[in-house]
């Protein structure tokens, strides 16, 4: 373990997570199940993802994803520091899981997952299921291992933070979501990008057969050099041209900045 793992300020910092091999394996399985529920798929698992933990050298150390093609398919290696930011850990898990799904029918060329899809699904999992996915490290008190867990049962809106951001700042355009600059992933700009991406993904999933369309897009991604072509092919029942997507997104952005989500709940949801 790295010296950072025992640092008191990091042990109590909710923004960071300390990874242990046994608990990491359980978290990864939960991530897979949660992401599969978001995509609405029950397809059997195919690829292999290997996890490699190493002592963290700093609090801003990155995560490395290595994809390798073999005669019987693709395999992945996820290299993680044992102490890192929760958001960075969740984003890496979502990215490698999406890549595994997209490359199941790929040849030698790996699919390139668009940034808005990785960020949008990551934010959705953070807002709705993070406490169930990221397991805290075990503590020892008087020789007894304990692991505190707090569950909040009140129904909350997973898009609440994104909705607040879109009220305070103009939502990103489709072009800005499609081709983000490097500075858009940090600071306030990063929060706005992740919030816009979450709303974009959530609205796509809410379309009739939206989950099936998103799965179809992932499955054909390796066939194209840009995700827009795969997107239009998969969502052709909803959008004929890129301009149609831009108009639709402009309407969704305006709707999210002006309506209370509670007004759309059914009686069962509000109870």
Image (cartoon, grey):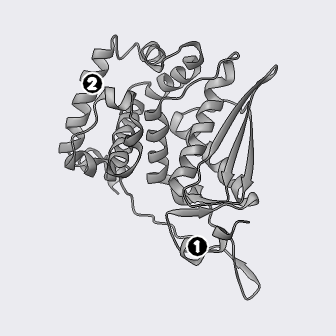
Image location of residue 135, percent across then percent down: 62, 62
Picture disc at residue 210: none
Residue drawn 55% across and 25% down?
112
Locate residue 215: give its quadrant. top right
Farthest residue to the right: give it.
Answer: 71
177 over 238 or under it: above or below: below
Residue drawn 54% across and 58% down?
85
Locate residue 200: give its quadrant. top left
Instruction: Name the element at disc 1.
Output: helix
Image location of residue 43, percent across then percent down: 66, 29
Q: Number of marks in the image?
A: 2
Q: Nearer the viewer, residue 155 or 111?
A: 111
> 10 Å neighbourhood of mark 1: few (<14), some, or many (≥20)?
some
Query: Which residue in the protein does label 2 denote?
Result: 248
Quadrant location of the C terminus? bottom left
Residue drawn 74% across and 66% down?
1
Farthest residue to the bottom: give it.
Answer: 142
Q: Is residue 145 left or right of residue 254?
A: right
Query: Which residue in the protein does label 1 denote?
Result: 11
184 over 139 or under it: above or below: above
Q: Nearer the viewer, mark 2 or mark 1?
A: 1
99 over 109 or under it: above or below: below
Image location of residue 175, percent across then percent down: 32, 26
Residue drawn 69% across and 35% down?
66
């Amino acid at each position: 373990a790295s010296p950072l793992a025992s640092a008191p300020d990091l042990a109590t910092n909710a923004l960071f997570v300390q990874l242990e091999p046994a608990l990491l394996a359980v978290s990864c399985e939960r991530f897979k199940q949660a992401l599969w529920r978001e995509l609405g798929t029950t397809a059997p698992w195919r690829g292999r993802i290997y996890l490699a933990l190493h002592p963290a050298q700093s609090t801003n150390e990155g995560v490395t994803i290595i994809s390798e093609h073999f005669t019987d398919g693709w395999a992945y290696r996820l290299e993680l520091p044992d102490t890192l930011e929760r958001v960075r850990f969740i984003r890496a898990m979502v990215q490698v899981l999406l890549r595994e799904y997209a490359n199941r029918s790929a040849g030698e060329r790996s699919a390139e997952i668009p940034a808005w899809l990785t960020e949008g699904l990551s934010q959705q999992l953070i807002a709705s299921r993070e406490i169930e996915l990221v397991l805290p490290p075990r503590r020892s008190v008087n020789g007894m291992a304990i692991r505190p867990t707090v569950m909040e049962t009140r129904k909350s809106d997973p898009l609440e933070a994104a909705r607040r951001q879109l009220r305070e700042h103009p939502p990103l355009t489709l072009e800005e979501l499609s081709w983000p600059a490097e500075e858009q992933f940090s600071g306030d700009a990063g929060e706005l990008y992740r919030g816009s991406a979450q709303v974009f993904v959530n609205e796509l999933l809410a379309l009739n057969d939206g989950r099936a369309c998103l799965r179809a897009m992932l499955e054909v991604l390796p066939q194209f050099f840009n995700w827009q072509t795969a997107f239009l092919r998969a969502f052709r029942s909803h959008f004929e041209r890129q301009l149609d997507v831009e108009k639709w997104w402009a309407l969704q952005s305006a709707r999210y900045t002006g309506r209370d989500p509670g007004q759309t709940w059914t009686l069962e949801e509000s109870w």
